[in-house]
Amino acid sequence: MTNGSIDALRSLAIEHLSPDMAEQWLALLRPGARLAVAGDSDYVVGRLGGLPMLPVDTEWPVWEGHGPLSFIASFDCAALPVGALDIALPDAGTLLFFYFDGQVDDGDALVLPEDHESWAGARVLYVQPGLEVSARDVPEGLEAYPSVPLTARVEMTAAEAWHPRIRDAFAPDAPLGQRYDHPVCSQDFLDALWEFGGEVGHQIGGHAQPVQNPVEIEVAVAVLDREVSWEDPRLSDEVGGWVLLAQIDSENAADMMWGDCGALYWLIRPQDLAERRFDRAMFTWQCG
């Protein structure tokens, strides 16, 4: 929901919350690598679009029965500020993100977390350091997105007040994913957070910046196959088991538009991340 320096966020919290509440809220902030289009003198940590450098024995990802996935982004783990984040990213190698964006079927098939068959339409590949790689031609039916270099800066990120982790801290009995009676849910505080820094943007780690509701809830509902109600504690437990790996916003410089100015999100369980099981990452997307 919000991102910025810890000092600026502390000032904002003290202005709108009691001292104890402000410190409690600040303790829930998480560091994230906010990504922006790199200038000529900026340190490049990754790219949107272009052509992926794949291991020589790895095929271009395909959603069987639908077609090849589009290449969205790559990140050099050695260049990312992994030591400043609170997720166990590799300190070397490359992360590649692919997504079935509808180019080959005019948007007929959608990748949705609630549709298990569509999960193959989004993929994260981890290329370990030292592997022989080569650039691949774009498969027939796809057009590569323009290559856009990205730079990163570490900022603190805040989740929405109705995010399960924030709700658990301030109002554990409140309904999941809904506003509740507490100063962190006051309109003045929410407006101040939005005005401070409410854009979605591109990001690695930290709290996701959703377009709509918390993306962790969407993923948890999908993983549990919609077999539990929102009041079921199993859903809240499942939500707490996912962290943001990456979010890719709509980006004019790369000709990327996800629905109506939406964003793509990849989430992963911390244990899977530590074990480099990027095949277990989950995907969702939101738009306005």
Image (spheres, grey):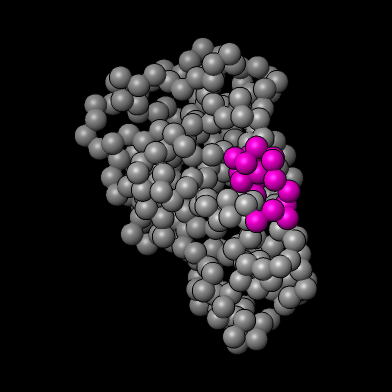
Q: Which of 167 and 109 is in front in this view?
A: 167
Q: Position of residue 258 (x, y in %)?
A: 65, 36
Is 91 situated above or below 255? below
Q: Can residue 264 be seen in this view?
A: no
Q: Is residue 279 left or right of residue 160?
A: left
Taking the magenta stretch, the answer to whether it contains residue 220 is yes
Q: Count the marks: how many?
A: 0
Rendered-image quadrant of the N terminus = bottom right
- Give yes or no for residue 169 being in the magenta stretch: no
Q: What stretch is highlighted in magenta?
A: 217-233
User: Does residue 85 lie above or below 250 as drawn?
Assistant: below
Q: Is residue 86 visible?
A: yes
Residue visible at 72% across and 77% down in the picture: 183
> In terms of image quadrants, where is residue 237?
bottom right
Q: Position of residue 100 (x, y in %)?
A: 57, 26
Q: Which of 51 and 18 is in front in this view?
A: 18
Residue at the spot x=55%, y=81% of the render?
23
Residue farthest to the left, as pictured: 130
Residue located at (24% from left, 30% from top): 131
Question: Would you say 248 lies left or right of 259 here?
Answer: left
Indicate the position of residue 92 as horizontal and vertical percent values.
28, 45
Q: Is residue 91 left or right of residue 259?
A: left
Q: Where is residue 203 in the image (x, y as percent from the top left)?
A: 50, 51
Identify the image quadrant of residue 107. Answer: top right
What residue do we see at 66% from left, 82% from top? 17
Judged left or right of residue 85, residue 288 is right
Query: Can you say which quadrant of the picture contains the C terminus?
Result: top right
